[in-house]
Image (tube, helix red, strand yellow):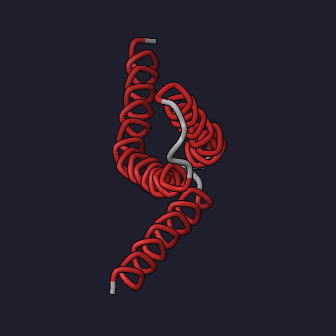
Amino acid sequence: MQLEQCEKILDEEVSQFTQWLDQTKLNPLIEQMYRDAHDVSENELQRLLRRCPDLSDEQREAIEQFVDRLVGKFMHPCVTVLRRHQRADSGVFLASAFRAAAAAKRNSEIRRVS
C-alpha cells in the first residue's frame, strides 16, 4: 500500500517537473513573439502618428492603448495554442513556425536598413 502511494506521489512530481521543464523551453519563445509583435506595432504606430501631427496628447494615448490591446488580442490565441500543444509534436512544429516567422521578420528588417 505504501509503495503504491509513493509511486503515485513520484509520478505526480515527475509530471509536474516535466510540465515545468516544457514551460521553461516555451516561455522564451512566447516572450520573443510578444516582443516581435510589439516592435511591428510600434513601428506602424509611429508611422501613423507622424502622418497625423495634429492629434492631441489624449488622442495619441488612446491610439497607443488601442494598438497595445489589439496586439494582445491577436497574440493571445497564438500563445494559447502553443501552450496547449507544447507537449505534443505539434508544439514542436508550432515553435519552429514561430521561430521561422521571427527570422523572416529580422531578415526583412535587415534588407530595409541596407
**Horizontal placement of 113 versus 74: left or right?**
left
Percent position (x, y) of residue 2? 39, 12
Which residue shows up at 40% across the image and 50% down it? 35
Which residue shows up at 41% across the image and 41% down it? 23
Which residue shows up at 44% across the image and 25% down it? 12
Residue 21 lies in what quarter of the image? top left
Q: Residue furthest front?
A: 54
Quadrant of the image containing the C terminus: bottom left
Percent position (x, y) of residue 64? 51, 36
Percent position (x, y) of residue 33? 46, 53
Picture mark count: 0
Q: Is residue 49 placed above or below 70 in the rendered structure?
A: below
Q: Residue furthest top?
A: 1
Report the front residue among 97 and 71.
71
**Horizontal placement of 48 versus 13: left or right?**
right
Report the front residue among 26 and 1.
26
Report the front residue among 77 and 94.
77
Q: Is residue 76 placed above or below 13 in the rendered structure?
A: below
Q: Is residue 9 placed above or below 26 in the rendered structure?
A: above
Percent position (x, y) of residue 47? 50, 58
Report the front residue among 10 and 32.
32
